[in-house]
Amino acid sequence: MLIPIEEHALLIFWVQLLVLVALARALGALMRRIGLPSVIGELGAGLILGPSIFGRIWPHGFEEFLPGDEAGSAALLAISWVGVALLLVVTGFETDLALIQKLGRAAILVTAFSLIVPFLGGLAVGYLLPEAFLGLGLEGAGGDRTTFALFVAVALSVSSLAVIAKILSELGLMRRDFGQITVAAGMANDVVGWVLLAIFAGLASSGGFDVVELGKTLGGLALFTLLAFTVGQRLIDNSLRNFLKSGSDVSGALTVAVLTMLVFGVVTQYLGVEAVLGAFVAGVVLNRSRFQNPEVLHHLESLTGAFFAPVFFATAGLRVDLGLLNNSEAVLWAAVVLAVALIAKFVGAYTGALAAGQSKRAGTALGAGLNARGALEIVIATVALGLGVFNDTAYTVIVLVPMVTTVVASVSLRYVVRDWLGSEDEQERLQREETLSRNLIVKAERILLPSMSGPASIAAAQVLQFSWPPEAPVSIVSVTGAAPAPDDIKVLENVLYERTVEHRILAGTDVAAEIAREAKLGYGAIVVGVAVDHEGGLLSPMVDQLLQTTTVPVIIVRRARNLDRPLPGAFTRALVPVTGTASSKAAQEIAFSISQDLGTELLLNHVLPAQPGLPLKNLFSRGEAADPSTEVAERLVSEAKAAAEGIGATVQTSIVASPNTAQGIVLTANRLEADLVVVGAALRSVDGRPFLGQTVETILERCDATVVVVTMPRLRSDDGH
């Protein structure tokens, strides 16, 4: 039965949230302003509002603010736990399992050394700490010093995945190689920490631990992980797929994300390994789904960063009472504990990194990052206090560890990575990821390739292969109405080598509608090949209808004329008309990728209405004032050239004048002897059929080279116009 909170207690709860969030956000913003992670300010807000400062300055006001009643504390702690769970869902979204697998040896060795070395250091400190730190539950119990030392050891050895993720994310380091290793090691630290806590708590309460229960926990955790990435992945995929099919907005995908977090959290909490680890696995599995809405991560980050995470970190700071360190001996031993925690963790991570072949700089960064502690240390200290293993002084010292180590980790990590770009391979990967994140269509998203089992589809597959990154999977859908010959699909798979490819046959008589429905299921673009000539239209009826119905970018590949073989040769020279439209920029992305992959020479061309065939630079060589349109053309071409050179494309530029834009492009392509033209089209509807614009349709009619036309989805109003 739910017991209502009395009005005054509810008022106190809302005041707590208001003050915590306001001060945490303000101090967090201040930290960001001086170049430090906001988590430092958020922890500091709790320290200021806790017994260490607020409680000393105004005891009566502090008692009103934190009266210590069970209901109020439970409500505040519940909000903070939801916050850390959401934070770990976001971390899971940003965790790259493929990259971690690639860095597997480093992740394993760093994890092992970063746990073992500080555990041994903590064990030594636990045996050396004076009797004044031992709890009442250990008095007169021979051998209980070992239990005390074990609790100190586990508290000093484990890192906090939540805090690590927050620091890496705010410093923009999550996608760095060492960042992914840090996340992997942090996850393992949390798992080991919870397991060891269960073992040592049993040892403290009953003098031993239940081997059977430990086996159940570890076996249950392994089974949960297996089911999460198999059955759970399928259920999540099906749920997200159904929301996409129904046309649901981002709210449907958010519902799936929250429910997955809660389900996984319930399971791991039941296993005794804490709900936040289930939340992390939920984020990883959600991000792996091909049907995931890309806006979900943005919404989760906004909600977590604005409210839940500040509450969590500020609440952690509320637990610290520096007033308990009221004598020189306590202060001295607190300094020793902190020094061992910081040094041993750094040495362990650094040693593991070097043993794995990482650079000294990477080892230093890992040592700095893994020094961040968090909620687990507080839980360990709380459990030890409740069992009588720690007294209040020992509790304060251990709770102080995550506060200090988080600040040190934040500052030192920022200093270590300053001006450090990483290895050449890492720089190349990060640059590619940055470029893909800014692109309009060339991203690492799944591509839909409708296949008519002919040369046109082969040409489309070739353009796709040279344009999209290898990690972008492809779904080939046969639209011929019957099962294609195995050799036809084999040809396409051979063209799309080293890429994840799946094949399906679309059912139904309305092929274009089926493709459009399929395209809603998490695809980034549709690449479709068309033959050179069609009866009754420029494109095939199926492509015409597809352009009218789909809301996904469509890339039309019309293969070159007069080819005597199914597969075109590798493109050597390409013409790219440059305008300021979104479709033109998307076309440039495709051309730049092809050039980067094949070394294709690109000519970025802009045509202005003027004397036909006369290069623009000659028009103004006598010193006449340039037309404003000239300045715009030069700016557009210069920007396109800079973007092309930024990713290593081979590029030249040309601005020409012609009374007919299409004619100017075709003539330029002929003079260049281009075997590829990549152009963007502004899609419109005329007389019930899609119209690509007079320029583009003239190019399709008159140009002999392979022509790639990029169309962006049209914005549709509610009335369908």
Image: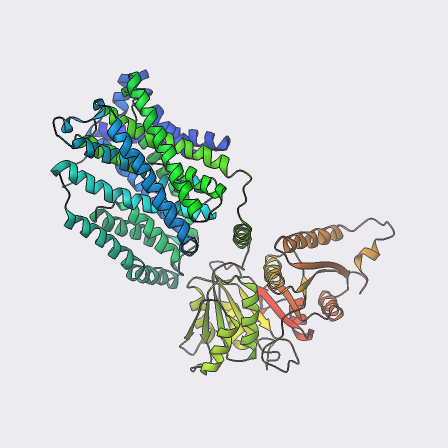
Query: Measured from the top left, where is residue 153 in percent x and y?
Result: 27, 35
Task: Give 120 or 147, whichever is nearer the viewer.
Answer: 120
Residue 418 drawn above or below residue 94: above
Residue 661 drawn above or below residue 107: below
Left or right: 563 with respect to 522? right
Residue drawn at x 42%, y 31% as measured from the top left: 408
Left or right: 464 with respect to 288? right
Query: Measured from the top left, where is residue 18 in percent x and y?
Result: 34, 30
Residue drawn at x 12%, y 26% as measured from the top left: 140
What residue occupies the far right of the structure in this picture?
A: 622
Residue 617 lies in what quarter of the image? bottom right
Task: Give 73 or 571, whichever is nearer the viewer.
Answer: 571
Q: Identify the coloring.
A: rainbow
Residue 471 drawn above or below residue 420: below
Residue 555 in view, yes or no? no
Query: Measured from the top left, where is residue 471 in percent x and y?
Result: 48, 61
Residue drawn at x 82%, y 48% as measured from the top left: 625
Residue 244 lies in what quarter of the image? bottom left
Residue 121 in view, yes or no? yes
Query: Measured from the top left, where is residue 481 in percent x and y?
Result: 44, 81
Task: Give 666 or 54, whichever is nearer the viewer.
Answer: 54
Q: In which quadrant of the rendered image does the N terminus lie?
A: top left
Task: Give 300 or 213, whichever is nearer the viewer.
Answer: 213
